[in-house]
Structures are given as C-alpha cells and as structure tokens.
Image (cartoon, rainbow, N blue to C red):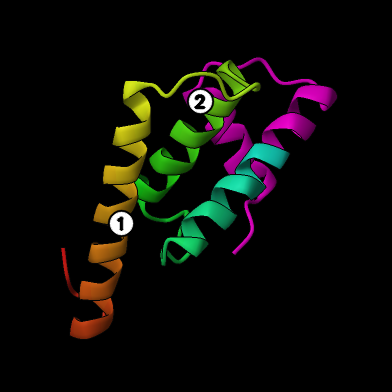
C-alpha cells in the first residue's frame, strides 16, 4: 500500500509542517523511503495501524529535520525499536489470523 494524499497530509499535520506543492514532494519522497525501509525490515504497509503511521512520521520528521543525515540521534534507536515492535505485531497477527493485539 502506497501512502495516499490523505496519509501524506496526516503525516505533515503530525509533524506540524505547512504543506505547499514543493514540501509535499519532499514529504512524499521521505514517505516512500520510509515505506521501503520498513518493508526491508519485514513490516507490511498498514496506514490503518497508528503505530505504522507514527513510524513513518518519525522517519519523515528525522529526514526532514536533518536531510544531510548528520550524527546519529537518540531518535534512531526509537525508530529501530518501533519497527521491531511493528514487525513482531504483524507476525503475531498472521499467526492468529489477524486477532493479535
């Protein structure tokens, strides 16, 4: 599932970023990278899951604030931990037929 326009607007709102056409292009690129990053970590796209949306927003916010990718920040650990939680939750849902917490 690729982020819809509504998903992009929600992520921008969560990050308190004013959106114009150019900023939305940047956000769209970062969202696409976040989706790829999560997919590579074994997480399925699911914008219906608040945690998934928050992980994407956290990734976008980190990239938007530091596009040069400077020194590692404490937020890096948070993204990794959130991604692992998502991956495990999705695996549990697959095993239980979608009823896992």
Residue in view at x 27 percent, y 74 percent? 91
Secondary structure category for the residue under label 2? helix
Q: Answer whether residue 97 is visible to the viewer in this image.
A: no
84 and 21: which is toward the camera: 84
The boundaries of the magenta stretch are: 1-28
Q: Horizontally, is 58 left or right of 81 in the view?
A: right
Q: Horizontally, is 100 left or right of 10 in the view?
A: left
Q: Which mark is residue 42?
A: none
Q: Which mark is residue 62?
A: 2
Relative image position of residue 84 (x, y in whole percent): 28, 54
Q: Which residue is mark 1?
A: 86
Q: Answer whether residue 16 is visible to the viewer in this image.
A: yes
Q: Are marks 2 and 1 in contact (CB under 8 Å)?
A: no
Relative image position of residue 3 (x, y in whole percent): 62, 52
Placement of 97 over or under 56, stated as above or below: below
Work out which quarter of the rendered image holds the C terminus and state it.
bottom left
Residue in view at x 43 percent, y 61 percent? 41
Secondary structure category for the residue under label 1? helix
Instruction: Choose mark 2 or mark 1, whichever is in front.
Output: 2
Placement of 101 over or under 67, stated as above or below: below
Q: Is residue 2 magenta?
A: yes
Q: Horizontally, is 74 left or right of 8 in the view?
A: left
Relative image position of residue 5 (x, y in whole percent): 69, 44
């Amino acid at each position: 599932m690729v982020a819809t326009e509504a998903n992009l607007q929600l992520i921008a709102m969560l990050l308190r970023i004013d959106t114009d056409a150019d900023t939305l292009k940047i956000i769209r690129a970062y969202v696409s990278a976040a989706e790829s990053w999560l997919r590579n970590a074994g997480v399925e796209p699911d914008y219906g899951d608040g945690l998934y949306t928050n992980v994407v927003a956290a990734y976008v916010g980190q990239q938007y604030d530091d596009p040069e990718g400077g020194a590692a920040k404490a937020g890096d650990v948070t993204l990794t931990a959130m991604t692992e939680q998502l991956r495990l939750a999705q695996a549990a849902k697959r095993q239980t037929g979608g009823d896992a917490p």
